[in-house]
Image: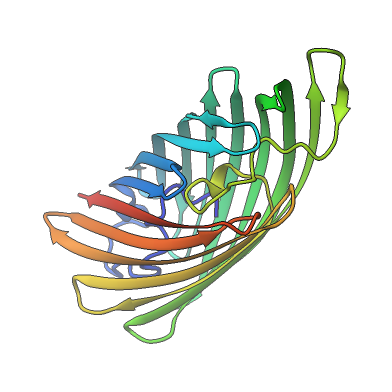
Amino acid sequence: MNARFLFLAPLLVGLAHADEAAPNADKRALNLAVQRDGQRNQSAAAAISLPVGQSAWLQAGVGQSRNHDAASVTTYRPRQVSVGGGVAGKAWQAGVNASQRRDGERLRQTDVAAVADWRPAEGVNVGVDALRRQGRVRGTVAGAPVEQRVKGHGVGVHGAVAVTSRLSVYGATLHNRYTTSTTQPAGGGGLLAGVPLLGNRVSAVNRDEAALDRSHQIGATWRVSERVALNGEVMQDHVHDGGSLRSLQMKAAIAAGAGWTITPGIGRSRGPQGEGTNYGLLGASYAW
């Protein structure tokens, strides 16, 4: 899940043209995305991928988000950069992506994600995901400075099936193992327990930045016409600090011509404390 840099990725699975000149011919693309919810969380990201030779590709991305944390009454505004690449064959592809989020000395997070896909039959796609994370966040709790560190790794599987020429269904699950330590560097407080700095108000907009022990996703895409496809998906995540994040969203992919695809969407998520929020998203993809 985290390996998919923008939310456009799962929309139209398995729709690549059979007569493409090379397995990486569809990697020449620019993707843009923005999201915002009712809790003042928001994100904006851009990514570009370019084919290299007949089978490889390179990709790079930038982004920025704003996350309001209720526990420390702090607003984080991390910037993100990412680089990656991969290689593809006729019925398979594999890639790796490294990303770093940073908000000065207050937040640092490094992720390395890998994904491998295989198409055993026409209209069927299966794959595996792997993620490694290391992060640090600083804030205040009850007026005292607190630092929390997190590190861990995860593995998962995903798959998609074209049920008919118009309907595709997909699903994914990812299990992570995280260890966290929370300290009070000033005043000699030492190791603390049960003081999460991020996660109390996690929503679908900032879920990629949260420590999630388990993530599950199911969805379906209906191709209304050659120019329009509708997509709906449900996500359920178990947050490492406790509680669950549940999200439901609907999107549409609209071919706008001249290589552009526009993707508007709406959703609703319910966080670990039981609070719910609506959110909106808008994406644009250009292929040439």
Q: Position of residue 260 (x, y in %)?
A: 19, 54
244 or 180: which is nearer to us?
A: 244
* In this rendering, position of residue 101 left or right of residue 128: left
Residue lying at 53% horizontally and 25% vertically, measured from the top left? 102
Q: Position of residue 200 (x, y in %)?
A: 64, 45
Q: Position of residue 47 (x, y in %)?
A: 36, 40
Count of labels shown? 0
* In this rendering, position of residue 223 left or right of residue 268: left
Query: Could you tell me which quadrant the N terminus lies in?
Result: bottom right
Is residue 34 shown to the viewer in this render? yes
209 or 182: which is nearer to us?
A: 182
81 or 212: which is nearer to us?
A: 212
Residue extending farthest bottom = 164
Residue lying at 28% horizontally and 59% vertically, measured from the top left? 264
Residue lying at 33% horizontally and 47% vertically, measured from the top left? 33
11 or 237: which is nearer to us?
A: 237
* In this rendering, position of residue 141 left or right of residue 80: right
The image quadrant that residue 129 belongs to is bottom right
Q: Position of residue 248 (x, y in %)?
A: 48, 67
Residue extending farthest left = 258
Residue lying at 56% horizontally and 53% vertically, measured from the top left? 115
